[in-house]
Image (cartoon, helix red, strand yellow):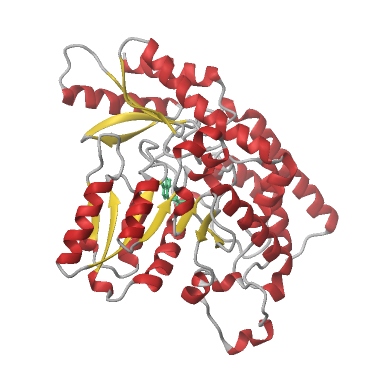
Amino acid sequence: MSLDPEELRRLGYGVIDRLVDHYATLSAKPPMPVPDPGWSAASVPPCPDGPTDPDAALDFLFGEVLTRAQYTSHPRFFARIGAPSNPVSVLADLAGAGVNVFAGGWVGGAGPSAVELAVLDWLRDWMGMPEGTEGVLVSGGSVGTLTALAAAALARVGARSRATGYCSEHAHSAVARAWRTLGFDPDNLRVLAADEHHRLPRDATRDTIEADRSAGLEPFVIIATAGTTSTGAVDPLAGLADLARAASVWLHVDGAYGAPARLTPAGRDLLAGIELADSLVLDPHKWLFQPYEVGCVLMREPGLLERTFALDGAYLRDTATTEVQFRDRGPQLTRGSRALKLWLSLTVFGLDAFRAAIARGLELAELAQRLLEERPGWEIVTPAQLAIVCFRRVAPGLSDAEVDALNDRMVAAAVADGFTAPSTTVLGGRPVARLCTINPRTTDEDVRATIERLEQLAG
Ligand SMILES: Cc1ncc(COP(=O)(O)O)c(C=O)c1O
């Protein structure tokens, strides 16, 4: 299972050439794959007993597999939350995989562990959390939420069956999944109705906590969202932090997509209070422009992640050390390094490039809102916030149900058409169209052309 060095070089350069071509031609491709009902596991050739031609295998990979993929770095990928990656991080992932770097412990991975500590401290600083806050890089927001809530439970929960948590109806579904996975009673996750700005209302949260406590339950965590996936709304973080302190409950903040906006002046205002979280999740594979998979958990209480996740075994005794062991800070023992790509891209481009790229995303949603407002037949449902704008096509004489169906059809047609990829969500029980504009490579013209295309399709 080795290749002649020159053959490896040739194949490797070929892969890089194909990637460079992919980036150069991205805008001409569909951002979402065109559905192909003929494609299935049976389309993948059976495992050969002997060697086959590597060029043919790479042709299949690039021609058949990687073409059937959403391109979240595409300038007109506006669906859900994109992952507008950067090529320098790809090189770091390649280098890490090439060395098969181990970031689970210091003895086998002092290099990547030190980089992870450094990068975590950068993230902590950008989020305004105090020195001493610790962290770990995980696969993304879902595992980050699970990791943070597991630690919060260890710190605060007595009887798991009586523990209650509080989040808004717009919290990401990863919260409810983590809640169930951790063995809490699903009925004890209080999913509160959001206010008119789609935020978790502080007073209703307080009242519910009080009522639960009087009923003998154990309120233990408020889960606030800093940038909801549907609308970009930010729960009232500072007020919820006050409430959490007064009510002696944990404050977890899900900033999976929104938190990096704190690197910009506008985002810093919007996210005021995020620094008060007991635990915070953010996803560098969203608005810090990293390729999948990298999420981050930051934990205010030093040592708590280790108390939650530390593992040991006779077979690990030779790797004991007083230095950090990232295997003890999360659910993975063997882990590659997610820190390398963050470190390399930030080092090569510099933090100002990231700040500017985030600010550009904020502006693009404002541009989309302005364009929609200028043109007849559009209603803004939620204004641009944290690079998301929600809207609907309206037409005189149509019932609400007909308008809803029109918007669903318009978005589905746009995606199928292959030019642009908006998505939908549901607000107030009704579907709405939505653009998430966090890709700094999106041009003003991409936004304008997307709106024009939607108009044509709605017509
Ligand atoms: C607010 C929020 N939380 C959590 C998640 C889940 O993150 P991941 O998909 O990385 O697991 C997302 C994903 O979009 C999100 O927007």
Please give the count of numbered marks on the rendered protein. Answer: 0
Q: In this orientation, which residue lies closer to the viewer: 257 or 305?
A: 305
- Up-down relation of residue 183 to residue 91 (above or below): below
Res 213 quadrant in image:
bottom left
Q: Position of residue 427 (x, y in %)?
A: 26, 35
Q: In this orientation, which residue lies closer to the viewer: 427 or 356?
A: 356
- Up-down relation of residue 294 to residue 321 (above or below): above
- Up-down relation of residue 365 to residue 245 (above or below): above
Q: Is residue 439 visible?
A: no
- Up-down relation of residue 8 to residue 363 (above or below): below
Q: Position of residue 208 (x, y in %)?
A: 20, 55
Q: Position of residue 354 (x, y in %)?
A: 63, 38
Q: Is residue 381 visible?
A: yes
Res 124 quadrant in image:
bottom right
The extreme bottom residue here reads 314
Name the residue located 70 percent from the left edge and 51 percent from the top edge. Answer: 92
Is 436 positioned to the left or the right of 21 in the image? left
Is 349 positioned to the left or the right of 302 in the image? right
Q: Position of residue 51 (x, y in %)?
A: 68, 60
Name the residue located 48 percent from the left edge and 17 percent from the top edge. Answer: 449
Name the residue located 37 percent from the left edge and 10 percent from the top edge. Answer: 375
Quarter of the image with the C terminus is: top left
Quarter of the image with the N terminus is: bottom right
Name the residue located 71 percent from the left edge and 40 percent from the top edge. Answer: 350
Res 186 quadrant in image:
bottom left
Q: In this orientation, which residue lies closer to the viewer: 303 or 440?
A: 303
The extreme right residue here reads 6
Q: In this orientation, which residue lies closer to the viewer: 423 or 390?
A: 390
